[in-house]
Amino acid sequence: MSNRYGEWLKAQREAAGLTQQELANAAIMTRSHISHIEGGRRIPSEEDAQRLDKALDTGNVLSSFRPQSDAAVANYFEAARQLEQQATMIREYAYSFVPGILQTQGYARAVLQADFPPRSDDECDRLVVARLDRASILSDPVTPVVWAVLDEPVLRRPVGSPAIMREQVSHIIDLVERGRVRVHVLPFGIGAHPLLQGMVSLMWFEDQPPAAYSEGAFMGKLHDSPALVERLQGAYDLALSDALPLRESLALMRAIAKEHGDHD
């Protein structure tokens, strides 16, 4: 999104002679939340914008001109990526591809090479490096806490080659066995469920309101609205309740990895 909103907020704050912490205190928010809004990384909720207007005596300007989360993924995912790096808890749902932070190099390249319009080898190299850099958040043994709900087709779809898929599924199994992530599989037999229409990533933070990112074909949105984030959290919880328990999910993933190996 354009950062004019954040820049204008910063100008009004400085004109009022307030630090970020002083504005945060007056608006009943956290300093880091103010910082992210001014930096263009967050959109304030309607309630936050109203409190900012009151604290800065700006009428209803910040409420009336609050940006809407309707940009394409090309513009919005950078903000989602930055939040991903700050999150203390992440819950992923995927129905077509393995979530980016769980992808192996071979799998990431195969996904990127299947995109349209086609990408050059150099561009694929750059994007693979960026995707693997996202996965580096799992190098910390504890934070963020990561859960993933994967539709069974995510694990069975032959992306790249059987060898690439065996490596990818085995990588997820290793992360689960090491206790670094929790993965629950939604089997084919469940049928329709609340998240079937697209990919969802839910993020929680130490000192900011939770956020969500959803994605479909050629489109992605970052959601800050408390009501919508809560709705997505509820949908995730319902889907999770239909998924296989952890041990059964592991057993199924091991079987699927073996099937990919049998097709090498």
Image (tube, grey):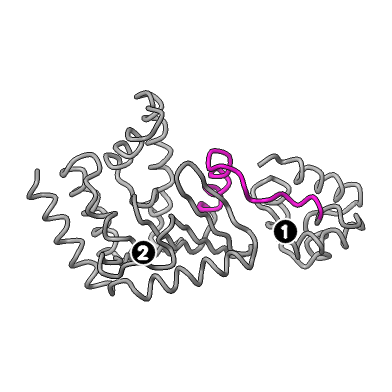
Determine whether, in the image, residue 115 is placed left or right of residue 188: right
* Distance (Cα) linking label 1 and label 2: 33 Å
Which residue of the protein is positioned furthest toward the front in this rendering?
Answer: 192
The answer to which of 88 and 193 lies nearer the viewer is 193
Residue in the picture at 29% in, 59% down: 175
- Mark 1 or mark 2: whose residue is earlier in sequence: 1
Residue in the picture at 33% in, 33% down: 113
Instruction: Give the image location of residue 228, x and y in percent.
Output: 60, 64
Confirm whether the magenta stretch covers residue 65: yes
Confirm whether the magenta stretch covers residue 115: no
Instruction: Give the image location of residue 39, x and y in percent.
Output: 69, 45
The segment highlighted magenta reads 64-85
Q: Is residue 206 above or below residue 77?
A: below
**Callout 1 touching callout 2 (CB < 8 Å):** no
Residue in the picture at 47% in, 41% down: 218
- Which label sits on residue 199? none
Q: Is residue 19 above or below residue 190?
A: above
Q: Which residue is mark 2?
A: 149
Q: Which residue is mark 1?
A: 31
Instruction: Give the image location of residue 65, x and y in percent.
Output: 79, 50
**Rendered image quadrant of residue 170:** bottom left
